[in-house]
Amino acid sequence: MPTSTEPGRPDPETTTLARGHDGRPVSDRGDTVCVIGAGASGLTAVKNLAEHGFGVDCYERETGVGGAWNWRHDRSPVYASTHLISSRPFTQFPDFPMPDHWPDYPHHSQLLSYFERYADHFDLRRHIWFGTEVVRVEPVGDDRWDVTTRSTGGYGPERTSRYAAVVIANGHNWSPKLPRYEGLEQFRGEVMHAASYKDSAQLRGKRVLVVGAGNTGCDIAVEAAQQASRCWHSTRRGYWYAPKYVFGRPADQVNDLLLALRVPLRVRQWLYHRTLRLTVGDLTRFGLPKPDHRVYETHPIANSLLVYHVGHGAITPVPDIERFHPHSVELTDGRHVDPELVVFATGYLPRFEFLDGKLLGDDEGVGRPRLWLNALVPDHPTLAVTGLLQPDSGIFTLAHWQAVLFARLLRLRVSRPERAAAFAARVRAGAGERYSGQVKDSTRHWFEVGHADYLRALERALRELESK
Amino acid sequence: MRSWEWARPVRPVRREVLSAVPELEEGRPPLLFVPGFGHGAWAYAENWLGHVAARGFGGYAVSLRGHGASEPAPEATLRAYAHDVVQVAASLPRRAVLVGHGAGALVVAHAMARYPARAAVLVAPVFGGWATFGTALRRNPLGTLPAVFGAGLRLNRRQLFSGELPDADARRYTGRLGRAARRAQWQLLTGADPEPAVGDPPVLVLGSPDDRVVPAAALTRAARRYGSAPLLFPGMGHDLMLDARWREPIDAILDWLVKDPARDDLG
């Protein structure tokens, strides 16, 4: 059994000294596991690894927990009005419910307090090194890892520690993805990515063009409808705008009722189309393009207000952008609009700059790893990525079970190595598997999973691991 | 997959939580007491809560919905009760030890599958099933039989207390008893077994061989489920926290929490 090493400063005086391949001293942390990031996925990884008896060192570049959900963090993408897209039961950790008296769709500040309470309740902060960023993660043979850290901002010396395993939970919503458009450099108006959008005051009184119909794009368009003097909303294709409530209940709860009843996808799609038709109505009458796909084929958008404001004329739906001119933007249908401010809500790309992309099977270096269950790395049984998911529900439940799976796998490596080896073959075979129905192929949907399909696959993997 | 639980979340209610915390925070885990059917948080507030606080532990007791001063809930199920326990446990500052009495022990067993408790203590656990029903029927046919048809399960003094408890106290306590929801009562007979606990908590089972609700064999069975033997306090009734010698079992629980070698981080 792994012995739980007491967390503490990896002090060269008290631990065995080894030499890294560049000759610098490495402090050996024994069976301890390294977790990168103390956001939602990192916290649940720390909690579950500690619960399974492992010592854990977690490195967090910021000074608080909560990662993307901590608005104080400079990489945090949340804006003042951010609320949850999935309702409470889907969003909370499965073993630490959110308080009953919270609303169905809590605000991001409530979510931050939820993570802080999670960290305190399970006494996780003693494992976390705040203000420390990871510079390098290198394999050193025997499936162990050298992790080099320094204080955030690059001050102070680098320090290398050797770990039995590494969990990467650095998040994937912080490195903005900006599309290229012809003439964007000549455009005289203001251009920003949604990552730097914080408050609706930034839109007040301006003519705003919002690009992108993700949940963020729709939120910003809705705020622009109320604050800006004019709002255009540019989308590549038509989408299904699902309301947050149907039949008097949060929409995802209704959806999961159908999933619990094992209603087949086709029937669910038909029901969904019917419901939208009856509640939201035909969107093409507003000039919105007809969706070129069925529901469940793109990441769901839950926004009751977008259609409302389109109906009030506060949002003008427009097609994709053709090119930029110095004082106007040309659209694919030949129209010109003249915004003062363009907000690109065009998403984020994952980045693992501390790690050789090839280790994760990302041979082209585009930031798309080849993993099994979006978490386990073929050929590197002691490396895992958690939270690299774009589920059609809350992500934290999924990250929790990923962490449980990895913790059990690590335990199995000690107690029954031969079974762990057999499981490694399973990881290799399953790499790149998808857990959703057919989805549109774009970077947006790289990590798209259907939460039901995904959790069932994860449950099977857990059973496989436990079976004798 | 917990689609059902997601699709139909438990209705939120206002819950009564009584507490007694030590003057000096000593870093010990809080104890969350869960009363059995018919009882409310008051049953613990009477003796145990204060004693727990005096020994340096935070003591909290919840009234399950429909009990004590919590909101009425005539349609509550075991799942709703377990939800109440997990909600309160998650609101405590640190990982809690769950202590369940009677049918509350079954509620705790269900809650343990949804919350990684630090440890769990099952006091005179009623895990339901037909054998328990048979015992209850034999000892108190008039109080038990109507429950089958949806009336409240009634327990009498002889079932709950030993003869040592002063008459006035016993009368006062039985007067405060309420009832559980009928669906939850039926689930005692027919409900599914609790799912395995998460987080691998150590479990202590204790009770009395002279308990007129839970026979000694049932205690042994419950303890074996968690791989241990029951701790016995002869001469006491079912309500160990209200009976005349209430001090012995609670001291045993706290000693176990302090001493248990697997829990050396408790301090």
Image (cartoon, coloured by chain):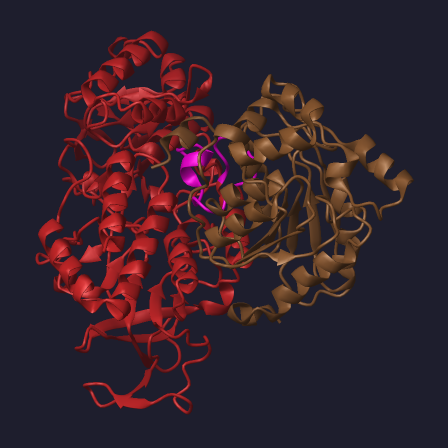
Above or below, comparing residue B23 to residue A460 in the picture: below
Residue extending farthest to the front is B138
Examine the rendering and report whether any part of residue A97 can be seen: no
Location of residue A205 in the rendering, given as x and y in whole percent from the top left corner: 45, 29
**How many marks on residues?**
0
Residue A102 among magenta residues: yes
* Majority secondary structure in the magenta region: loop
Residue drawn 19% across the image and 62% down it? A419
Residue drawn 40% across the image and 58% down it? A48
Location of residue A430 in the rendering, given as x and y in whole percent from the top left corner: 12, 49
Which tint was used for chain A?
red
Task: Choose top left, top right, bottom left or bottom right for residue A188.
Answer: top left
Above or below, comparing residue A168 to residue B85 in the picture: below
Q: Nearer the viewer, residue A427 or A248?
A: A427
Above or below, comparing residue B111 to residue B30 in the picture: above
Left or right, residue A223 beside residue A173: right
Left or right, residue B102 beside residue B112: right
For the C terminus of chain B, the quadrant is bottom right
- Give the residues drawn in magenta, as a range: A83-107
Location of residue A453 in the rendering, given as x and y in whole percent from the top left corner: 24, 36
Q: Nearer the viewer, residue B124 or A396?
A: B124
Chain brown in the figure, letter:
B
Task: Choose top left, top right, bottom left or bottom right for residue A259.
Answer: top left
Left or right, residue B154 beside residue A348: right
Examine the rendering and report whether any part of residue A124 can be seen: yes
For the N terminus of chain B, the quadrant is top left
Task: Choose top left, top right, bottom left or bottom right for residue B77.
Answer: top right
Residue B162 among magenta residues: no
